[in-house]
Image: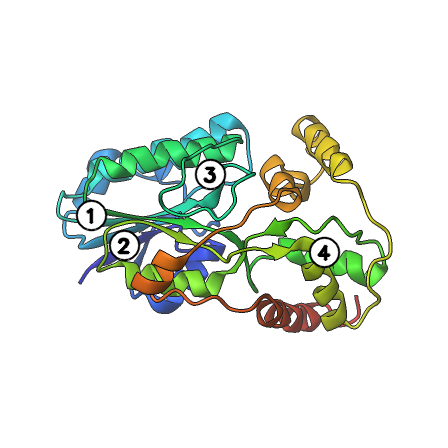
Amino acid sequence: MKVYITGANSRLGYYVMKYVKGKGLGRRKSSYVDIVTSYEEEELKKLLKDADVVIHLAGKVFGSYKELLRSNVLLTEKIVNAIPKKTKLIFASSISVYGKSIKEGDENSPLNPDTDYAKTKAMAEEIVKEHKNYVILRIGTLYGEKYELYFKVFDLLRKGRMPLIGNNRVPFTYAGDVGKAFKNSISKKGVYVVSSQGYPVDYVIKISAKLLEVKEPRFRIPKTCLRFASFLNKFLKLSDFLNEEVVLSLTSDRTFNPKKAMKELKFRITPIKDGVKRMVEIYKKLKPHA
């Protein structure tokens, strides 16, 4: 079976490649493999003519709407136009397509994309569905050893500068569990929610502090302040951590029901404490004296 993977060099690609034997699709090593500029459509058709499965991971979370449209929508359209009808297309979508106020979301819940990122992912899903032979995985808020953005939180915890945010639930999902789900989706069809049910964000911050062996945060920052900082970040480009999608994900209360994926894809959820422990172990090796 010939499997091609876009975005194989991305963070999620690292975990997918651990479980799926496939060939990375791209001409240069990059977190976001830009096939839009790397390949013409006819080139892609020749390259993928013998593909049994294409796993489409490549895309962007950060950037302007134009960049997101190009990387998430136009790139998906190019892939769909290039692959044979018989080829199974597995698309990495996001729970963000449901919006930021959903409770017990599942595959039948209505979509309500409320950010540029979410809107482009929802648009890409519609293109994928035109292919017919598809699987769409709506993935939770990913974390794992390769997601260095969380290491900035660990830095702040060590310095005593990380605030508590709230008891709103965030669907943190260990990327290794998602990698296994991609492998098991090759023989399936349809849409799956591949996400944890959700964890209170303050709880995650506190267990991170405990695993780092530092004091728990004592001060709290209002969610409105974070959201205002995110608004300013659109113009000032202060930090990826203040990206609209990131901030709304961390300050909204969302829960999900992954029962279908657990049954059909054998999706198993690593407890948040175990997943964070793995990240802390890597972080301490990288920054033993930080």
Q: Position of residue 271 (x, y in %)?
A: 55, 69
Question: Mark 3 or mark 2, which has the lower sequence index?
Answer: 2
210 is higher (above) or lower (below) than 163: below
Q: Which residue is mark 3?
A: 98
**Disc 2 residue type?**
Tyr
**Disc 4 residue type?**
Asp
Residue 48's disc number? 1
Q: Position of residue 241 (x, y in %)?
A: 67, 44
Q: Secondary structure at mark 1?
A: loop
Question: Mark 3 or mark 4, which has the lower sequence index?
Answer: 3
Q: Is mark 1 in CB contact (under 8 Å) with mark 2?
A: yes
Q: Secondary structure at mark 3?
A: helix
Q: Is residue 285 visible?
A: yes
Residue 202's disc number? 4
Which one is closest to the eye, mark 3 or mark 1? 3
Question: Mark 1 or mark 2, which has the lower sequence index?
Answer: 2
Residue 164's disc number? none
Question: Mark 4 or mark 2, which has the lower sequence index?
Answer: 2
Are there few (<14), some (14-19), or many (20+) residues within 10 Å of tag 1? Answer: many
Quarter of the picture holding the C terminus: bottom right
Query: Which residue in the rendered view is the most extreme toward the front?
Result: 104
**Disc 1 residue type?**
Leu
74 is higher (above) or lower (below) than 8: above
207 is higher (above) or lower (below) than 85: below
Q: Which residue is mark 2?
A: 4
